Amino acid sequence: MSDSISFIVYVSDAPEAARFYGDLLQLKPAFETPRYITFDLGGGTSLAVWSGEGERVSPELARTSEVCLSLSGGAEAIDRRFEEWVGKGVRVVSEPRDEVFGRTFVVADPDGNLIRVAPVD
């Protein structure tokens, strides 16, 4: 097993994507280069935005993976986060709804990458 794991999101503009994710997740970058920026999520886990594969990034392409933010506090916390993010102007992919695992919604970053909010398992 490795000491750390990074989840990489391909974006067309790393600094712009870092501003988007930093504002949305209320995090500051832990490591920055012009095309690769990471956010420390704790426990040896990080979220990275990388524009090194930018020629493959297009908001029109279907996305088959998601970044998932798990919140405690039940359905009310999920709905509050949805309203907060809508106030920031995010693109809503799926409005809050109840699923087998609880309340959830999905938004997209400027490149079309999906971000789900769901309850803590």
Image (spheres, grey):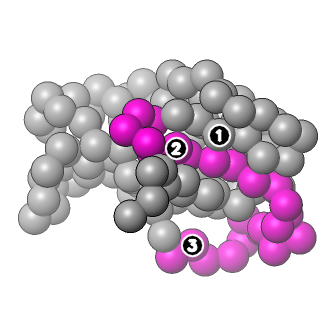
Estimate the x, y position of residue 99 in percent, counting from the top left.
Answer: 15, 61
Mark 3 / mark 2, whichever is N-terminal: 2
Marks 3 and 1: in contact by CB < 8 Å?
no
Could you give the CA–CA distance between mark 3 and mark 2, rounded to whole angstroms?
20 Å
Q: Is residue 41 left or right of residue 11?
A: left
Could you give the CA–CA distance between mark 1 and mark 3, rounded to whole angstroms?
21 Å
Indicate the secondary structure of the residue bearing disc 2. strand
Indicate the secondary structure of the residue bearing disc 1. strand
- Disc number lying in front (1 or 3): 1
At x 49%, y 30%, the residue is 25
Viewer-nearest residue: 61 or 30: 30
Mark 1 / mark 2, whichever is N-terminal: 1
Residue assigned mark 3: 63
Give the vertical position of 87 relative to 71 (above or below).
Answer: above
Give the vertical position of 117 relative to 29 (above or below).
Answer: below
At x 82%, y 55%, the residue is 51
Residue assigned mark 1: 38
Q: Is residue 72 visible?
A: yes
